[in-house]
Image (cartoon, rainbow, N blue to C red):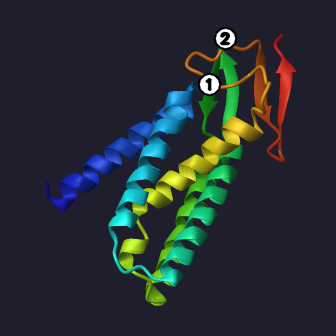
Amino acid sequence: MNTWMHMALIAAVVVVVVVRRLRGEPLNARDLFAPPVVLTGLGLWALSQEHGLRTGDCVWVAAGAALGTAFGALRGATIRLDERDGVLWQRYTGWTFLVAVLSLAVMAGFAVLAERNGLAPGARPVQLSIGVGFLGGRWWSATVRFPPGSRSRPSGGARTRRSVRTGSAGNCSAEPRS
């Protein structure tokens, strides 16, 4: 497949995902965790195939993973959660996309620094960066916004009697339905 076709396909997928996330979609555990776990696994596999990594490369990978997880958690805090017909739905907000763009810029700068410091290109798998970023957001949604014992938790068919919204500090408040 030529480069332009590949870029057009990626752009089309991005547009579809953005539209779906702006409209909102049901929140379920499979969709929450499967893609980030697969991407993180692929990134770790790619990293394991890289031979001759030095200590500095491994420290850089760990720092990049921590940074990606932190930005993912921040992005996860900006997602709006509402109940529709007894099912918990997620919807991205303008803040979600702002944090996503900011995290892409910071991670790109982090990659430039890695290259300038002579770190191995194989020590920076893109799948790992994306996967840990999504895992950070999912971690936020699953543990911080829905602590153990919470009535409103994502599942295969999350049913709830309350609407959950994120406050300005990222904490959740449950509001009774009217």
Amino acid bearing label 2: Gly
Q: For the residue labelled by badge 1, is the local secondary structure a helix, a strand or a loop?
A: strand
**Is the residue 52 above or below the residue 162 in the image?**
below
Q: Which residue is mark 2?
A: 86
- Frontmost residue, 57 versus 103: 57
**Is the residue 98 above or below the residue 25 in the image?**
below
- Badge 1 density bin: few <14, some 14–19, many ≥20, Cα 10 Å: many
Q: Is residue 9 left or right of residue 30?
A: left
Residue 93 lies, in percent from the top left, at: 64, 41
- Frontmost residue, 12 versus 154: 154
Q: Which residue is mark 1?
A: 89
Amino acid bearing label 1: Trp
The answer to which quarter of the image holds residue 15 is: top left
Q: Is residue 6 visible?
A: yes
Residue at x 69% of width, y 52% of height? 74
Residue at x 36% of width, y 73% of height? 122
- Frontmost residue, 167 versus 93: 167
